[in-house]
Image: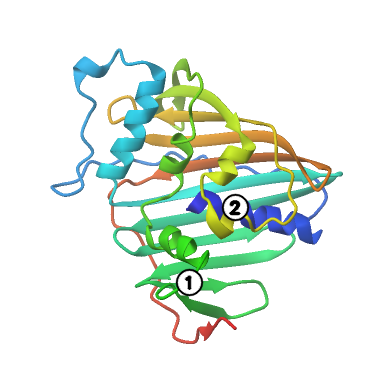
């Protein structure tokens, strides 16, 4: 879900012609401490007999473990896109807690800050120069039912959706030290169109008349004990309305199954028209 929301938001900004001159931006690289928690949210180690699994099998197991074991999470994400000498950057932080809470704050360079909150089957959005707006996810019709399903399943940070699209070879690049952690690095690629279609429905269709085609390289850094991700990175070049676009995304997954801070529902939110 977070991949979809952030990707569509950045591509929509491109379609509107906003942005700024090229600028560098990077994620906060300060080391974060991982955690093992008590019953109901324990991150179990990989059984020793599984150490020789193929890289593709490890990614598949990582997706399953994420779905089964992760109950809460916070993280950060950086997205960059460039087209015709104009660059866009988006820095965001996010948190989710099962079964129905999610919060994301995104800063779009040159455009301001956006917030998105999901609580109790209601979505709240705050965009630059406007207050909070709200929309109930209950009783939606047609294509919006797909949107309701996507938004109401806060466990779908996008990690499982992306891994479900991996059908080609997965390369094991060995162990690396990243932000003070010992991690295993894997690399694969999918078509950018498959990346977008992984989320389906109105989110995938929200960039009008987009001819999105080309390979996307994806890198995963996993904890070798739990097989859960610490960092995901994606890079691609593709065409949108006959214009060449460069795209990069980097996401870190922090504080598995720890308490997360999610704001209360805003009392002054106005309903969507």
Q: Give the percent coordinates (x, y) of residue 89.
A: 69, 50
Residue for badge 1: 141
Q: Measuring 41% from the left and 41% from the top, which residue is drawn there?
A: 160
Give SS at disc 1: loop
In front of the other: 125 or 21:
125
Q: Is residue 27 visible?
A: no
Indicate left or right for 260 with 192 as reference. left
In front of the other: 194 or 53:
194
| Res 161 → quadrant | top left
Q: Measuring 37% from the left and 58% from the top, which residue is drawn there?
A: 153
Q: Is residue 95 above or below residue 256?
A: below
In front of the other: 197 or 4:
197
Give SS at disc 2: helix
Q: Residue furthest left?
A: 39
Q: Residue furthest front?
A: 142
The quadrant of the image that shows the C terminus is bottom right
Q: Measuring 75% from the left and 53% from the top, which residue is drawn there?
A: 209
Q: Is residue 172 above or below residue 109?
A: above
Disc 2 crowd rating (10 Å Cα; few below 14, some 14-19, many 20+) is some
Residue for badge 2: 204
Q: Give the percent coordinates (x, y) of residue 218.
A: 55, 30
Q: Give the percent coordinates (x, y) of residue 35.
A: 27, 42
Distance, label 1 to label 2, CA atoms, is 17 Å
Marked residue nearer the N-terminal end (1 or 2): 1
Q: Is residue 72 above or below residue 16?
A: above
């Amino acid at each position: 879900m977070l991949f979809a929301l952030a990707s569509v938001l950045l591509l929509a900004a491109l379609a509107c012609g906003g942005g700024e001159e090229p600028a560098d931006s990077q994620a906060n690289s300060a080391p974060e401490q991982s955690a093992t928690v008590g019953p109901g949210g324990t991150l179990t180690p990989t059984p020793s007999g599984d150490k020789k699994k193929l890289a593709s099998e490890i990614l598949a197991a990582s997706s399953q473990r994420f779905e089964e074991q992760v109950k809460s999470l916070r993280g950060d994400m950086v997205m960059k896109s460039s087209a015709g000498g104009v660059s866009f950057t988006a820095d965001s932080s996010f948190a989710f807690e099962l079964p129905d809470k999610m919060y994301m704050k995104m800063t779009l360079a040159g455009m301001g800050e956006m917030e998105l909150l999901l609580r109790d089957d209601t979505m709240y959005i705050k965009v630059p120069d406007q207050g909070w707006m709200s929309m109930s996810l209950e009783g939606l019709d047609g294509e919006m039912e797909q949107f309701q399903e996507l938004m109401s399943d806060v466990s779908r940070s996008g990690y499982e959706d992306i891994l479900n699209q991996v059908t080609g070879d997965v390369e094991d690049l060995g162990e690396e030290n990243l932000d003070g952690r010992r991690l295993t690095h894997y690399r694969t690629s999918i078509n950018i169109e498959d990346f977008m279609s992984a989320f389906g429905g109105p989110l995938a269709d929200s960039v009008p008349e987009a001819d999105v085609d080309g390979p996307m390289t994806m890198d995963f850094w996993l904890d070798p004990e739990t097989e859960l991700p610490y960092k995901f990175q994606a890079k691609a070049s593709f065409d949108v309305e006959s214009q060449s676009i460069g795209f990069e995304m980097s996401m870190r997954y922090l504080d598995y199954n720890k308490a997360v801070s999610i704001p209360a529902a805003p009392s002054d939110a106005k309903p969507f028209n």
